[in-house]
Amino acid sequence: MMLLIPVENQVRELDPKLLLACIAARKGFSSVIGSRRELEFRIDTYPRSIYLSKSMTRRSLIFFKMARKFGHDIVTWDEEALVHLPPETYFSRRLHPDAIRHVSHLFAWGQDNEDLWRQYEHLPADIPIHNTGNPRNDMLRPQMHSFYEDEVQALRRQYGDFILVNTNFNHVNAFGPDMNLFQPVDKPGELARFGRAARGMNREYAQGLWDHKNAVFNSFQQLLPKLDQAFPNLNIIIRPHPTESHDVYREIAARSSRMHVTSEGNVVPWILATRVVLHNGCTTGVEAFVMGVPAISYREAVDEKYDNGFYRLPNAVSHQCFNFEQLQDMIHQILSGKLGAADGDERQRLVKRYLSSQDGPLACEKMVDVLAGDNKKNTSYQKKPIAIVNTDAAASKSKVPWNIAQCCQSNSGCQDDVGKGHLGDLRFVERLQQITVLNRHPDTSTQNHFDQKEFILHKEIAAEEDIAYAPKYGWNQKKEEKLLS
């Protein structure tokens, strides 16, 4: 059976989805990882497969109908269900009653996510919800830190000690004006039309969120120069949300040689490399907590309706400061070693409710077990694995045997105790790391959207190099037949 694994945001999604494909290979699955757009355009060219969707919105509906028409099964999680909007707003924005009917399995981040979905009045009675956790959480576990070690050390060599400021003002500072909560008005006093970020919200909620996010956004703009002056021995890394405009931050950073604006790479190594994470309601606050890295939520602008109704989790698991003096003192305590990461039983219980599989079997393993069990019921879908590789011409020059599954099926790759939470030994992590690096095109490794390449992960290594490259569109039927013979 084949898994179709779409990637929309490369820096956030690629690494955990590679891990998922690697684990799936141990259960006999072949996997195709590629641009969401390309996988959707080519859906009629793939053999019957399991498509791992990341949303169930109105946009998903047309594709779901098409995928089901070609015999594909659809399973899904929701990328936005960890730090989520209040239920009614979340439902209207993230779930579509017709789309969810095409889904055979739901994978929840944790108990909170499962409970949220069960409140949905259009949830099909027969759809199972599996409280598995998420592959992104697997990458935060201590056993996986070595996967990012080279990147962590490179960041420390380049920037030394630094404060990581993660912003999430995409509701009011998106790189396209139509992507904000409200679109620009042509005339003063004109009623602003909803932007993409307000879809599913009523005007009162959207206006309140707009006002609050603008207040927090302005407070961070004032904060950055103060940080620069107060901590002259530290670099300040400003890492905007993937859909945020960088213009405001670049203008501020231009005034100092120690402020840098970047969205390069996955955020995990940046968190591991920093002395302290600074945010307001950002998922990176949760990630920092899980990895034991000090994080501070800077809350100079407060609106409890949104801070507790939308951003409760990341704020609650971080240290909190409400003015610059408090923040300055807390950063000094962290730098001196007097204060570490936020902790406490209440925070641990909260995170455990939101994030399953923090120990024991990986979320990836639990998901694959569900799919493997379901696959046994659909034996007519079985097909000998197809070996096809990267379709990017520049990457193909390396002539790399594109086989991530090798690291999981070889006895020297990972051991059977991966499921016990040990990830076998470090050789498993080292091989996954090597494959990830090999599969990254040097010109696109820092881009947010995964549009320029497609990776095919397979269980068998093609013996001949001429089988190693598929045409840009569709299957190469002769090579497929040659491989399967």
Image (cartoon, rainbow, N blue to C red):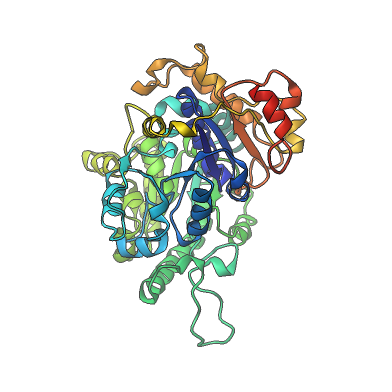
Query: Does residue 142 sit above or below 50 in this rendering?
Result: above
Residue closer to the observer: 269 or 32: 32
Query: What residue sits 43% from the left and 70% below the top?
Result: 210
Q: Position of residue 379 (x, y in %)?
A: 44, 31
Q: Would residue 232 be found to the left or right of residue 73 on screen?
A: right
- Work out whether 211 lies above or below 30: below
The percent position of residue 82, horizontal first and vertical second, equals 37, 49
- Say if residue 411 shows up in the picture: yes
The total number of labels drawn is: 0
Q: Position of residue 23 (x, y in %)?
A: 46, 27
Q: Quadrant of residue 219?
A: bottom left
The residue lying toward the viewer, choosing from 362 and 62, is: 62
Q: Nearer the viewer, residue 169 or 474?
A: 474
Q: Is residue 347 left or right of residue 300?
A: left
Instruction: Please tell me which residue lies in front, 292 or 23.
Output: 23
x and y, in percent, of residue 438 in the image: 65, 28
For the C terminus, the quadrant is top right
Point 56% across, 69% down: residue: 178
Residue drawn at the location 58% of the way across and 58% of the way down: 249
Instruction: Please say whether residue 399 is visible from this viewpoint.
Output: no
Q: Image quarter for residue 304? A: bottom left
- Most extreme residue toward the left is 345
**Outermost residue to the top:** 411
